[in-house]
Image: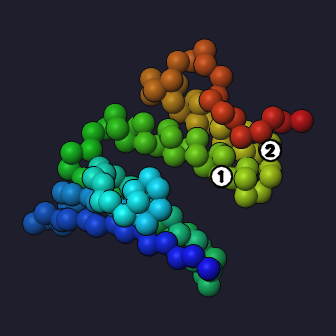
Amino acid sequence: MKKVDIKLQVELDDNNVPSSIVWSSDDPPSNGQEADAKAFFLSIFDKKNLETLKIDLWNTEFEVGEMNRMTYYTLKGMADTFYRATNNNEMANDIARFAQYFGEELGIVKKEQPPANPPAETK
């Protein structure tokens, strides 16, 4: 069985606010090399308590527009992940439609664009 390390390193300023975020992974795209990041959203499902533990951090350089874009792409990814995990076309498409609406309202995507790579067609 293969094991892979995924590492997150957060440097805090004097007020315990993240000033630097560095990540690495044994696998691609990092291949063990450290890479700078401005933010991360981490969700872990606790097997024992059946709840999600979350850590959402961003550094002092992270701008609101970048948060908008990160959230948009996170929502799009959630639609795809939800579909792959559950095969629930209808709900995955609802998540994708919300992601599209979110992106349109924040000016990340144009309103006339259909959702990019919807997870599945609703039957």
Numbered tag placed on residue 81 in the rendering: 1
Q: Residue 75 appears at what percent x and percent y?
A: 56, 44
Question: Which residue sits at x=20%, y=61%?
Answer: 17
Q: Residues within 10 Å of mark 2 (few under 14, many from 20)?
A: many
Q: Secondary structure at mark 2?
A: helix
Q: Residues within 10 Å of mark 1 (few under 14, many from 20)?
A: some
Q: Which residue is mark 2?
A: 89
The structure's colour scheme is rainbow
Q: Residue 112 appears at what percent x and percent y?
A: 60, 15
Question: Which residue sits at x=58%, y=46%?
Answer: 77
Q: How many marks?
A: 2
* 12 displayed left or right of 110: left
Image quadrant in which you'd find residue 23: bottom left
* 99 displayed left or right of 33: right
Q: Amino acid at mark 1?
A: Thr
Q: Sequence-wise, which precedes: disc 1 or disc 2?
A: 1
Q: Residue 33 appears at what percent x and percent y?
A: 32, 60
Q: Is residue 56 visible?
A: no
Q: Is residue 121 visible?
A: yes
Return the residue found at the far left: 14
Q: Residue 38 appears at what percent x and percent y?
A: 29, 49
Numbered tag placed on residue 107 in the rendering: none
* 76 displayed left or right of 72: right
